[in-house]
């Protein structure tokens, strides 16, 4: 087992990974940019080294410098978390060339699964169902239109090297295809340095359901149930849950076995996720494979009792997976809300600034994977994710109620957050019934955002003023008659 591991990331995922490493008796090393000099992950590590720079390109994407720090600090392995270098095949190869273990899949699997066209070809050859699509290197508008007319509108144009909804356009009619094709190529080129796009049939009102897999170096591959990630905004996940309310046991088994089949076809090792689109008739189609630890992995940990980071580390160290498929038992239900520093009332614009007050939820069945602290700065340079709040219960209804209670307890002052937005989603009848799909947020955006935080803020201010005017001390002959000094001090502190 490793004695020292460098975590090449920041924020909540860096802290989350280091917590497991410390439990395993492994010393932790991290790196930080100039804005992150006193960030939580920097303070949390046993050793922290500066990268310099402010933007991601100038800091956390500097693979050569990170490997140099790993070697100089004596770290035997690097855990990339998610984002940044986690799905960079060149970085994985660079780690191997420098004698540092990359805690993730081999570079070949990252490269193959990172290209959507290549991954579709591999899955098709392996007998994994994929959404009907069309691609060729010099695809013209005429080519794309020919496929669309044959498959039927609507269709999706997708960036081959894409992710996070970038380089993606839905096309409903023939006259819009040319403009969408040009826009997708332009966005793909600027976001990924690769303007290659392809077209595929659009699945109407789909669910986004993914299977967590583990694969070791000895041919053992198993699946750990599914996560439903259908609550999305602009193709980015917002709320996830496990298991899915839409998946019956026989479908879960079939999807799991298909995910294992996909992982074997890719020559996969370590933790990964196979993502599927599922139509209203429970037909599922391969979407992509994420060759890293997912943001939403805590909900799988809740229902399986496993520590996925510990499994990743053991596999990278050459150990067997700690259990067999028959040992995987799913119990209870878990929900995750991604808490962002953003303003839902202003088109979800990022809300950087100083956290002036922070009160995090606790209690039975609550877990808050956070990278922030009171007085800390939320930088404009990085993703605005503050924390991942998860709630666990014996069934879906209890997990949702527990999450609502936790959101009530969550107080962040000084910046805007999407906490109230989550409240509205969880209390919506469609979500409560489990009848939602990936179009849920776009269909209900007005009712989920209008007055989302402004009305609540005004109400709090009005209530505070009313309370102060009606409860301030009445001085009579030098004595406070209305309340004690302690109560007055406490009240003044809140004001």
Image: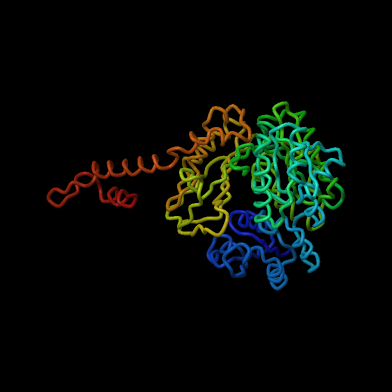
The x, y position of residue 367, in whole percent, is 58, 45
- Tally of numbered discs: 0
- Relative to 178, is 401 above or below? above
Classify residue 277 as left or right of residue 495. right
**Which residue sits furthest bottom?**
72
The x, y position of residue 297, in whole percent, is 67, 45
In this view, the residue in front, 418 or 244, is: 418
Residue at image position (32%, 41%) is: 463
The x, y position of residue 417, in whole percent, is 48, 47
Q: Quadrant of the N terminus?
A: bottom right
In this view, the residue in front, 9 or 165, is: 165
Classify residue 261 as left or right of residue 231. right
Residue at image position (55%, 68%) is: 34
On the question of residue 283 being in view, the answer is yes
Q: Quadrant of residue 100?
A: bottom right
Residue at image position (23%, 46%) is: 472
Classify residue 427 as left or right of residue 46. left
- Relative to 202, is 468 above or below? below
In this view, the residue in front, 277 or 470, is: 277
Q: Quadrant of residue 13?
A: bottom right
On the question of residue 164 being in view, the answer is no
The x, y position of residue 427, in whole percent, is 52, 32
Classify residue 316 as left or right of residue 373. right
- Relative to 307, is 441 above or below? above
Colouring scheme applied when the structure was drawn: rainbow
């Amino acid at each position: 087992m490793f004695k020292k591991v460098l975590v090449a990331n920041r924020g909540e995922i860096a802290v989350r990974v280091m917590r497991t490493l410390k439990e395993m008796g492994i010393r932790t090393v991290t790196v930080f940019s100039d804005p992150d000099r006193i960030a939580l992950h920097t303070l949390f590590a046993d050793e922290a080294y500066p990268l310099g720079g402010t933007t991601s390109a100038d800091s956390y994407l500097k693979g050569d410098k990170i490997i140099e720090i790993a070697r100089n600090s004596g770290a035997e392995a690097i855990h990339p978390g998610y984002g940044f270098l986690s799905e960079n095949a060149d970085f994985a190869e660079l780690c191997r060339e420098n004698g540092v273990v990359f805690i993730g899949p081999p570079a070949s699997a990252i490269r193959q699964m990172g290209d959507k066209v290549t991954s579709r070809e591999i899955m098709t050859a392996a007998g994994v169902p994929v959404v009907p699509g069309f691609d060729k290197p010099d695809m013209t508008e005429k080519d794309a239109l020919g496929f669309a007319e044959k498959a039927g509108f609507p269709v999706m144009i997708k960036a081959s090297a894409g992710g996070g909804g970038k380089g993606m356009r839905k096309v409903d009619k023939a006259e819009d295809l040319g403009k969408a094709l040009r826009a997708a190529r332009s966005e793909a080129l600027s976001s990924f340095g690769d303007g290659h796009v392809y077209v595929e049939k659009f699945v109407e009102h789909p669910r986004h359901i993914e299977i967590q897999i583990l694969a070791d170096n000895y041919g053992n591959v198993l699946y750990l149930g599914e996560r439903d990630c259908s609550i999305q905004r602009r193709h980015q996940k917002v709320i996830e849950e496990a298991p899915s309310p839409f998946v019956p046991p026989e479908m879960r088994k079939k999807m799991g076995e298909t995910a294992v089949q996909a992982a074997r076809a890719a020559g996969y090792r370590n933790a990964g996720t196979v993502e599927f689109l599922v139509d209203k008739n429970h037909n599922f189609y391969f979407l992509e494979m994420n060759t890293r630890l997912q943001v939403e992995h805590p909900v799988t940990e809740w229902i399986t009792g496993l520590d996925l980071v510990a499994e990743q580390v053991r596999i990278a160290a050459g150990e067997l997976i700690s259990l067999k498929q028959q040992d995987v038992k799913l119990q209870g239900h878990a929900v995750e809300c991604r808490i962002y520093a953003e303003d839902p009332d202003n088109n979800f614009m990022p809300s950087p600034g100083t956290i002036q007050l922070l009160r995090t939820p606790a209690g039975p069945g609550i877990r808050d994977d956070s990278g922030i602290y009171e007085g800390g700065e939320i930088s404009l340079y990085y993703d605005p994710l503050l924390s991942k709040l998860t709630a666990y219960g014996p069934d879906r209804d209890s997990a949702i109620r527990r999450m609502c209670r936790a959101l009530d307890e969550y107080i962040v002052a000084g910046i805007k957050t999407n906490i109230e937005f989550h409240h509205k989603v969880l209390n919506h009848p469609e979500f409560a019934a489990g009848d939602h799909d990936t179009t849920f947020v776009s269909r209900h955006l007005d009712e989920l955002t209008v007055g989302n935080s402004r009305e609540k803020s005004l109400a709090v201010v009005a209530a505070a003023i009313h309370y102060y005017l009606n409860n301030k001390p009445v001085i009579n002959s030098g004595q406070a008659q209305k309340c004690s000094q302690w109560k007055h001090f406490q009240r003044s502190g809140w004001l």
